[in-house]
Image (cartoon, rainbow, N blue to C red):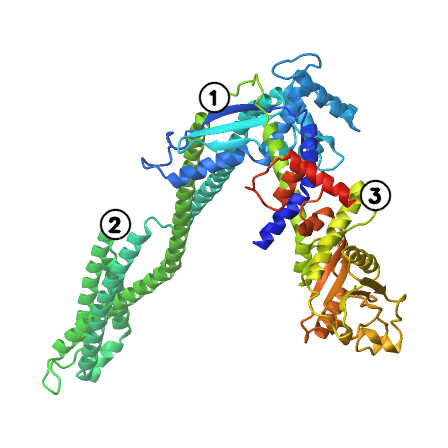
Amino acid sequence: MNYIISIIRALFRHRWLILLGTTFFTLLVIYYTRHMQGGYDVKATLYTGVASGYNLESDKRTDWATVQNSMDNLISIMQAESTLKRVCLRLFARILIQGNPDKENNGITASSYNYTYNHLKNSPNGAEILKLIDKSSEDKTVANLEKYMRPHRDNYIYGLFYYNHPFYSYNALKNIKVQRRLTSDLLDISYSSGDPGIVYNTVSILMDEFVEEYRRIRYGETDKVIKYFEEELKRIGKKLNLEEEDLTKYNVEKRIINYIDETKEIAAISKEYELREQDALFAFNSSKSMLEELEKHMDSNAKQVLKNMEFVDKLREASSITGRISEAEAMTVSSKTDDQTLINEKTRLSEIKQELNDLTSSYIGHKYTKEGASRTNIIDQWLEQTLLYEKAKAELQIVQNARSELNDRYVFFAPVGTTIKQKERMINFTERNYLTVLQSYNEALLRKKNLEMTSATLKVLNEPTYPISSNSTNRKQIVIAACAVSFLIIVALLLLVEMLDRTLRDASRTRRVTGFKVIGAIPNTSPSRYGGLTKTYVQLSVKELSNSLLRFLTKRKSPGVFIINLFSTSDNSGEEELGNLICGYMQSRMLNARFITYGVDFNTDSTQFLLAKSITDFYTLQGEDVLIVAYPPLSTSNIPSALLHDANANILVASADRGWKTIDKQLCEQLTQQLSKTDVPFRICLTNANRDAVEDFTGQLPPHTLLRRIGYRLSQLSLTEKIIFNLRRKAKEAADEDDDE
């Protein structure tokens, strides 16, 4: 509670500083906002059709996440730096082209034109840039400005957008607000500026530039994708044609009509030849074995027949004809000529057989062998088996040759099949790749068509309108805010100083800073401080202080006198002046009081003082009732403990306008250690105190005017105390003051 009271009293003490400071800052704000004008607002509404519009790419269900993403993209494009840069250049060009220095023209005020033209003309390269302005075409002017614009600090057009220009800078244009209206397809665009023509044309240009920027971004990426797919389709289609032509050429070179059917036919023929080879081999081996067995039963005469040259020639001819017949019969394809030849061969073979039989019959000498077997039968059998043997041999040779040729066909068809499959796989892969790219190409075309529909739905629902009247300014709110903020800042600074300041100043702060009680406060005795009231203030404060000291004079000390010790922590604290005032007041009350001080009445450097057990050791009493002793500052000399214990009151004299330093704290701690074993009171008396600090002890000081009475009661927080105006009482108090003087 004491802190709250101290804070309130501190604020009340600085009331004039708070009031004047707040008033000063408020007047400054009022002065600098005297030309403040209200801004002009322009609003427009854009229909997007993102949520409810027809979409070729989606089904009937609405993906709200996609819708929100699309709306965010539209808002971001509208507020993008590139879009605002084009708005800046087009607005700048339009003002210079359509503006008029004398009157408003096409919604462009004369003030905005003059400001823009003079700003450009006074720039270092103003004349050069003015040549870029084509009065006949706004688009050409914008193109010229874009070419001239370079990222350099000295480039006027670049600085126009990136510096803090009130109309064309990015910092000004990014204040354009774009907001979606609830969950609808509508975007609300609003902008405020100090010039009606600027704000109107800015929003109008933004609507056009946004649609163009949106189309550039969306069509740009889609056209690039479509172009890529077209190039890929051409490349893959050309590759597919080359691969198909290569496969066709390969089939022609290898004479392949249908690889699968041909390989199946070859496999069937191979199986047939394998069976025929087995049959031929079986017949060959059988006939060979039979010949060997028959030759064992032949005699020499029969064997000579076999060695006869004519017989051998006939036999060879029969073998050759048999081979040809077997080869002809093995052929799957035949003609009439081949059939006639085969018949002739068989006829000739029959003739040769007959001739062989005749030869064998003519050479046989005996009809039977020694074993009793018929020679004619053996020769006939041998001849028959020989022909069968030659036939089987010829058939085996033919089948083996066919198998050999068939193996060559296998060797031929094996790599051909692998190559054909590889080429077919490549063609299949290329074809699938072509179909995939074709599908992506169709999707890209569908995407482009959908973007065309989406862009077509971007429509300005509410066109921007030219503002006629400006908005009301918030100057009143600014002034009120400045007044409140300045008041709070001043109060906060004062409270901060109040908490950190260690100047003694008054009784409450002295007690909080030092920890010691305060017995009184004496004002500055200089007549210039309070004029004719200084003497009155001093008398009243000394009276209050002396009365407080008299309460401690209850028991005489060892010399038989009442002793009041005055000391300080530093020089010029006012203890001598205070001692004289107290002594004078007590003498006026008919008390035998005397004031003695160091360096005049006693020597603080003498042995008697330094080792004194009582004041009589260095001073001779002269029958005083009250002795007021002023000791040197504690920072320069030590006071014997016996002298402190032998006093009725020890008063530390401190100037109220001095700060309580660390050395003061240490000196007082040493002094309290000396007084720790005694009940002698230790107090602080403030000198050079202001009137408010003195009134804490004396009550309200004159003059007793109405404002002074109210101010005093407020400083004491006597908020509900009744104020009595008594003229007689007031006159009596004034007379008493005159008598005291």
Discs 3/1, front: 3
Q: Secondary structure at mark 1?
A: strand
Residue 670: percent from the left, percent from the top?
Answer: 74, 72
From the image, tell me which residue sits under label 2: 337
Q: What residue is at 73 percent from the left and 47 percent from the top?
A: 691
Q: Secondary structure at mark 2?
A: helix
Outermost left residue: 372
Front residue of 267 and 321: 267
Front residue of 163 and 670: 670
- Is 193 situated above or below 722? above
Discs 2/3, front: 3
Q: Quadrant of residue 331?
A: bottom left
The quadrant of the rendering that contains the N terminus is bottom right
**Residue type of the residue flagged with mark 1:** Asn
Where residue 462 is drawn, which disc sits there? 1
The alpha-carbon separation of the residues under discs 3 and 1 comes to 77 Å
